[in-house]
Image (tube, helix red, strand yellow):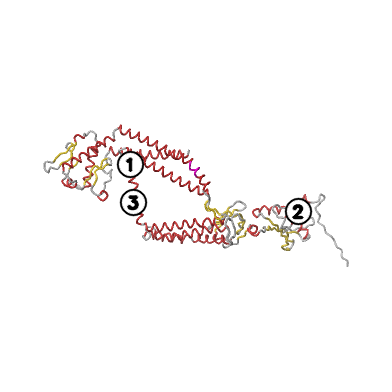
Amino acid sequence: MKRFRDVLVCFCLAFLLILGLSVTGNARGQTPNPGSVQPATLETLGEGFPVTLDGRVLFLVRHGIGSFTPEERARAIENRIEKIAGDESLSLENLRIRVDPEDNSPSIVLGDKVILSVTPQDAKLYRGSQTELAKLALGEVKTAIERYRSDRQPDNLLRDVIYTAIATVFLFFSIAAISFLSGRIFPALRRLIIALVPGWRIQNFEIFSPERIGNIFLRVLKFLRLLVILTLVYFYLTFVLRLFPWTRQFGDKFLTYFLDTVDLVAKQIAIYLPNLFVVVIIATITYYLLRTIRPFFMAIERRNLQIQGFYPDWARPTYNILKFLIVALAVVIAFPYLPGFNSPAFQGVSVFLGILFSLGSTSAIANIVGGVILIYTRAFQLRDIISIGDVTGDVIEKTLLVTRIRTPANRVVTIPNSALLNTNVVNFSVSQREFDRPLILQTTVTLGYDLPWRKVHAVLIDAALATEHILPDPAPFVLQSSLNDFAVAYQVNAYTDRPNLMPLIHSELHQNIQDKCNETGIEIMSPNYLALRDGNHSTMPENYLPSDYQTPTFGINQVSRNG
């Protein structure tokens, strides 16, 4: 369906082009325009100015007459002939040669109207008599007018329309057939190439796979198919445009216009050809140099190629930096060879861009430097869990300018790399990834001095082991971090290999600490809890208290003293 649509679009564009040219030419034929045919110059023609009708040259005018220049004389003769040709009421039988009795100069006339006069200078250049030259000119004029009128007869126009329709149908089905056959043959040829041509490998690194070679071959075939279709369209347009009198000159000069344009461009290029050759060499060397080094860095990134001391996560940024430096060096070398390099306008634009870059790139350069430092210090990688200031989350993007972090609340925080150079970066993932040592999660709880610390350690370790994603090996441990005024601070340390679940693990650990302490009758005094036990209810939940528990009363003991 897609190929059919493409063919239909080509057909419609070609048909509209022909129709537009035909209508334009028809209007010009009904209202003759003296400037419709561009006058040739003596330099291009080499001998004189042509007199044309329907794009065909009848003869050349090399000398003026009276106050008319040769060019003005040629245009005047051309306009008279075109008017006669467009008026079919004027019979060609009335075209004749009349000799002026005063100077014996022959003229071609229609009735009393002079079409052209033959001067002695004309006869001398043509190496013949004036009368012979006038007869030749009369024959050319009659033949051109007859052909002009014949081409515009309804039966001839109908014949041309039929030929156009046949050519259009042929073009349509030719493009459709080419598209259909290529759609069937090209994939088969690609599969054949993949099956027959081996890939190019170095160790585990594949430089050119059979699939890639097959794809390149397929692109070449598609390019050749495009050339064939364009060739068909060119011959179609040339044939159809030559059928109609109003577009015949376009058909005759269709290729000439293209070649003239190419010639003009080629002449301008030839002026800068030496410099262009240098620029092409620089661009070619740069391109193939980048194509050569890129596969090695990609192989390092995929761990197919290993270099001692060069980490895989350095591969892509190192390639990008080298690519920038190589391209920048190539541009600096090629700049003096560009057209107009020494012109004041070019230099002014260069100075303006330099000032603009200097004023606006200070912070950008600082961010780029920060990004490079972060890459080669390996502070963090993508998907690492890090903490920067008050922001903790997952690294989702790391560029030369900024770093993006997604917090547990799904908020994306963008931090300029220059800001990261002035702050500490805490990485919760690197210990497990590079040193095979799991992350230690810590939380602190304060309990009273009346509790045996060994019992507290056992309860807190039991709570940690009951928490999901806490590793039993290495085993959790408890540190008594401080002895406060009213309570002892116990720090729970538990290992986990899931730093990305830290908020959930912390929450579940706190839940288990509460449950285990309540189960063993331990009251939690975090952060501080001041109470007068006499006359106050226990702080533990009701379901953890004995069934016969009663709130104690406030008691006063009297001590007797003797003497």
In the picture, residue 389 is in which quadrant? bottom right
Q: CA distance from mark 2 to mark 1?
A: 97 Å
Query: In the image as oriented, which residue stretches furthest toward the right?
Result: 562
Closest to the observer, 362 or 368: 368
Q: CA distance from mark 3 to mark 1?
A: 20 Å
Q: CA distance from mark 2 to mark 3?
A: 91 Å
Mark 2: few/some/many CA within 10 Å (<14, 14-19, 20+): many
Closest to the observer, 393 or 79: 79
Amino acid residing under circle 1 = Gly
Give the residue at mark 3. 264
Closest to the observer, 219 or 88: 219
Query: In the image as oriented, which residue stretches furthest toward the left?
Result: 102
Give the residue at mark 1. 251
In the picture, residue 97 is in which quadrant? top left
| Element assignment for label 1 | helix
| Element assignment for label 3 | helix
Tell me the mark number nearer the camera, choosing from 2 and 3: 3
Closest to the observer, 345 or 453: 345
Mark 3: few/some/many CA within 10 Å (<14, 14-19, 20+): few
Amino acid residing under circle 3 = Leu
Q: Residue drawn at (18%, 46%), measured in percent from left and top? A: 127
327 relative to 242, above or below: below
Is residue 181 left or right of 536 when viewed as pictured?
A: left
The region drawn magenta spans 185-189
Mark identifier at residue 516? 2
Q: Is residue 450 on the magenta stretch?
A: no
Among the two numbered marks 3 and 1 on one chain, the one whose residue lies closer to the N terminus: 1
Dominant SS of magenta comes to helix
